[in-house]
Image: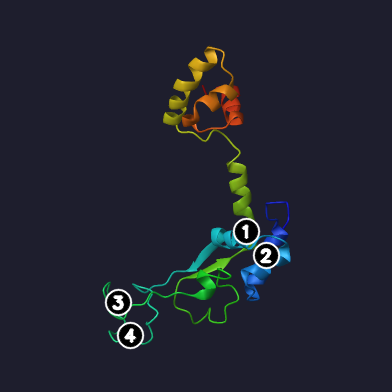
């Protein structure tokens, strides 16, 4: 396993190639020296719906339906459609031999879209204050009097776990004049 937690664009391209070549998640993971759960989460998190099934209900008995494909919720023949490729390993429909004839909802994986989504999320999670005004007021009611009494942010965070922020975050909020 690689000590670097973040997937690169190259690793995402390898994941995509593995999906297209019908490799299992574990095989893809070994090829990029990552844990299988990392690869699985990456695919599930960044795949996108490329086709939405137009059927009322996605029934595995669609082709042999006795009720003229007029699906209803308590149909005795209803069996939820499950696709091993889409729902399990590798988690996307890219490279599937049945992709053109399949009538059910399809998911695809695009390494560039996945990487851009990851970068956007990474940048946005490090910008600004992640608090609503109500949350900021509630924390301020606890923190401000303690700071005025000479308590350190370390002491405040340890004595008041209900504020649920780290010492570093509290320092950042104080330096940003949030309180």
Point out the frontmost of discs 2 and 3.
2
CA gap, disc 4 to disc 3? 9 Å
Answer left or right for 23 relative to 73: right
Q: Identify the residue under disc 3.
A: 71
Check if mark 3's residue and mark 1's residue have beta carbons within 8 Å: no
Answer left or right for 65 relative to 23: left
Residue 176: tell me if it is visible: no
The kind of secondary structure element at disc 2 is: helix
Residue 23: give x, y in percent of width and height: 64, 74
Name the disc covering residue 65, or none.
4
CA gap, disc 1 to disc 4? 39 Å
The kind of secondary structure element at disc 4 is: loop
**Mark nearer the N terminus (1 vs 2):** 2
Residue depicted at x 33% and y 85%: 65
Name the disc covering residue 38, or none.
1
**Mark nearer the N terminus (2 vs 4):** 2
Q: Is residue 68 above or below residue 128?
A: below
The kind of secondary structure element at disc 1 is: helix
**Mark nearer the N terminus (1 vs 4):** 1
The kind of secondary structure element at disc 3 is: loop
CA gap, disc 3 to disc 1? 38 Å
Check if mark 4's residue and mark 3's residue have beta carbons within 8 Å: yes
Q: Identify the residue under disc 2.
A: 29
CA gap, disc 2 to disc 4? 40 Å
Q: Is residue 77 above or below residue 170?
A: below
């Amino acid at each position: 396993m690689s000590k670097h937690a973040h997937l690169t664009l190259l690793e995402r391209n390898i994941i995509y190639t593995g999906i297209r070549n019908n490799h299992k998640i574990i095989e893809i993971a070994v090829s990029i020296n990552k844990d299988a759960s990392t690869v699985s989460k990456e695919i599930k998190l960044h795949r996108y719906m490329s086709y939405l099934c137009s059927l009322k209900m996605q029934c595995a008995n669609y082709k042999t339906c006795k009720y003229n494909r007029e699906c209803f919720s308590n149909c005795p023949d209803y069996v939820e459609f499950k696709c091993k490729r889409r729902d399990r390993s590798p988690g996307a429909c890219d490279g599937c031999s049945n992709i053109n004839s399949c009538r059910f909802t399809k998911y695809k994986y695009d390494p560039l879209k996945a990487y851009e989504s990851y970068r956007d999320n990474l940048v946005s999670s490090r910008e600004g204050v992640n608090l609503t005004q109500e949350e900021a007021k509630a924390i301020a009611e606890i923190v401000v009097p303690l700071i005025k009494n000479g308590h350190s942010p370390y002491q405040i965070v340890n004595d008041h776990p209900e504020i649920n922020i780290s010492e570093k975050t509290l320092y950042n909020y104080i330096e940003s004049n949030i309180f």
